[in-house]
Amino acid sequence: MLEFNAQQVAMMIQGKVEGDATIAVKQFGKIEEATQGQISFLANPKYEDFLYTTKASIIIVNDSLVLKTLISATLIRVPDAYAAFATLLTKYQELKAATLVGIQTPSFIATTAKLGAQHFVGAFSHIGENVVLGENVKIFPNVFIGEHVKIGNNVTLNPGVVVYSDCIIGNNVTIHSGAIIGSDGFGFAPKTDGSYQKVPQLGNVIIEDHVEIGANATIDRATIGSTIIRKGVKLDNLVQIAHNVEIGENTVIAAQTGISGSTKVGKGIMMGGQSGIAGHLSVADGVKIAGRSGVTKNIKTANSTVTGYPAGDHNATLRAQVHLRNLPALDKRVKELEILVQQLTQKG
């Protein structure tokens, strides 16, 4: 377990120590639960009261925080406590990973595979023929890597990840447990007798730099060519990316979302959970797709927001929902007016 004092932590996050700079911590803790020897942070004003009751040894806070009374913990002041704490967690994870090197047994590594420096291969992992791994690649137990796969530097494949043959993974990529990269796309040709003939999937998957893929996500290989995940993309758990899809840079996709084959998703897109996009469509840059929305046609307006099924303009959809909720009252009113008109007609 790694240990750091307040001054060392401040250097990592470019903060200023207020209190005992020599006090040391070994663990992280939530401010409302932290104990001695742990470090925490305060970014949300809702939790400020815990600042005066917590047992944490070190707390990262915003520069703007004004103390209401003296506290026992050492403070590290930074411009943005939340961002600084995230940076600290990242650095801690990197330092911890740096200590993890070597090859556990049993595991299989083909003689033609090339492994870079500072690699780690967990037990029961399989690395196929002509695989090339960069430096500081961490392969945890029960990972399968097929033949001719290329993986860059600083990549982590968590337990149970499967990477099919010929796929390419860039630098600084994290893939979480159970994710499958390069499985066959869903390609079947209908036959005259009503059955289906499988269309061989001969392409691959390319994952560029700084991508994170959640647990049990699946990214299908292309029929021909490549399924491409551009740099900076973040995929949540249980996301399905079909064959020949292209996801633009810095797009984020929440859980249980599916994107059908040959769709092109632009840069900087945000997709809410359980949303979906039909096949062979394109989505402009910067579009926001609300959760549980279904996109059935091209979205050509950049930086727009869509909602519902079929997905349409967010504000227009909300107005339509208001009218829909008012339908029972409107129906009642129409019937009352019909009765009134009938009465007036009879009197005339």
Image: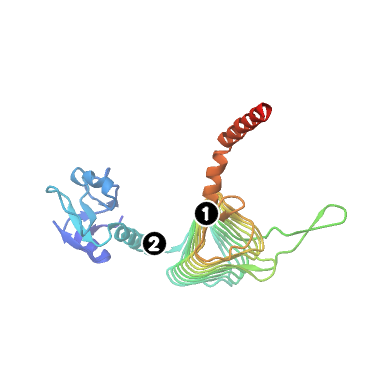
Q: Residue at x 22, y 48 (%)?
A: 56
- For residue 235, the mark is none
Vertical side of 245 occupied by 177: above or below: above
**Which residue is pictured at 84% across the width and 52% down the height?**
194
Q: Nearer the viewer, residue 241 or 295?
A: 295
Q: Is residue 132 above or below residue 263?
A: below
Question: Residue 155 appears at what percent x and percent y?
Answer: 47, 66
- Label 1 to label 2: alpha-carbon separation: 44 Å
Q: Residue at x 54, y 53 (%)?
A: 316
Label 2 Cα neighbours within 10 Å, binned few <14 / some 14-19 / many ≥20: some
- Amino acid type of the residue that numbered disc 2 sits on in the rendered structure: Ala
Query: Residue 258 at x, y = what percent?
Result: 59, 54
Mark 1 or 2, closer to the camera: 1
Residue 177, visible in the rendered structure: no
| Label 1: element kind | helix
Whether residue 325 sits left or right of residue 280 in the image: it is: left
Answer left or right for 342 relative to 103.
right
Pick whichever, 210 or 275, lies toward us: 275
Residue 185 appears in the picture as rendered: yes
Instruction: Name the residue that disc number 1 marks.
Output: 314
Position of 56 with respect to 140 (left or right) is left
Question: In the depicted view, which residue is nearer to us: 21 or 110?
Answer: 21
Amino acid type of disc 1? His
Q: Are marks 1 and 2 in contact (CB under 8 Å)?
A: no
Q: Which mark is first along the chain, 2 or 1?
A: 2
Residue under label 2, please give it: 97
- Check the image and name the residue furthest to the front: 348
